[in-house]
Amino acid sequence: MPCVIPKVAPLNTRICYIDAMMLKGLATFALLVAILQAPATAFAQASNHPAAGQQTSDSSTYAQQGQSRPDCNGVPCEDQQPRFIVTLPAPAPPIWPWHDRILWAACLVLAIVGYAGIMLAVSTLKKIERQISAVEAAAAAAVEAAQAASLHAQTIANAERPWLLIGVEPTPGIENSFNITATNRGRSPATIVSTLDQLIFAIDESHLPAFPALKAAETAAPFVPMILLPGEFITIKSIKREDAKTLCASDEKFKQIENWDERIYLCGKVRYNDLVSPAGKPTHESNWCCWYIHGRQRSGLAIAGPPEYHLHT
């Protein structure tokens, strides 16, 4: 099966091609030598064949010598049967014309030149193979360097971008009142573009849905994007003890909250952008979930919920 070398062939394919070229050169050289030896063989075979008319009999021999054939009482003896003697002429020197000599010399020169050309081609292919291997190694190193540079640039961008973290703090001056805040812990300003939240009643965290159905907060005024500098924070949700009964749809539901048969979970999401981010860049998100604890006399608010409720992008 012939070997085909692509633009950048594997190492085994290139070695197969080099071997095939060497075998082809050796076969060509052997064929030329065989052709050159053919005239000498033909001359040797021609000299070994006898010429026509070279066979003589005993009768002609006796006649030439002027002797009579011996007999036994007038009858030829049985042990003296006619014998044939074959005489061979002296071999003639082979004739090698000048044009055959010139052809033989030309074929020999062509064979030597062809063999030298094949060896030169094999040497060139080996050099090309080494150069291709060096280029492949350089290309692989360049790809690795580019990947490392991209990863380094992404790491720097993540370190310099804004990060909004959600926390819970008591409302200053108001007892049993709590604020859910978003603080910019990054190194660049952030622009808050939207806030979503949802109220969920569940027995415990294991009964929470896999993904909350968040919706925009209902307010009288439309949401206005806000800019947070590094270190600044903003209140995105507030809850007081008096709001617990309002959040429950009925007194029976509120009774279950007081008896801790069910719990109130506040879930939400903050979407924000880099202040200097280009247009069309995806927004970042900070998810949060809190458990409102309604006691007999005091209330509390704590971060709760599974990890899916606290994702950051």
Image (cartoon, rainbow, N blue to C red):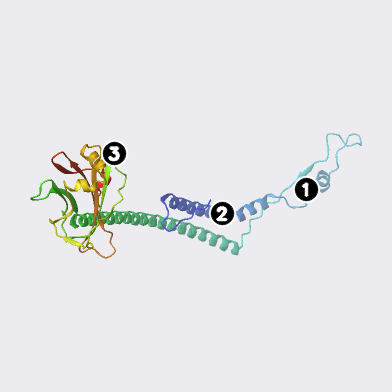
Other residues around mark 1 within 10 Å, as few (<14) / some (14–19) / many (≥20):
few
Q: Answer with left or right where residue 47 lies relative to residue 218.
A: right
Marks 2/1: CA distance? 41 Å
- Please state which amino acid type lies under the numbered disc 1: Gln
The residue labelled by disc 2 is: 31
Where residue 42 appears, x then y in whole percent? 64, 53
Where residue 130 appears, x then y in whole percent? 36, 54
The residue labelled by disc 3 is: 206
Q: Nearer the viewer, mark 3 or mark 2?
A: 3
Front one among 90 and 280: 280
Q: Nearer the viewer, mark 1 or mark 3?
A: 3
Find numbered disc 1 in the image and state the secondary structure of the residue it sits on: strand
Which picture quadrant has residue 74?
top right
Instruction: Work out whether mark 3 precedes mark 2 in sequence or the reverse, and give the earlier one.
Output: 2
- Please state which amino acid type lies under the numbered disc 2: Leu
Where residue 155 appears, x then y in whole percent? 22, 54
The residue labelled by disc 1 is: 55
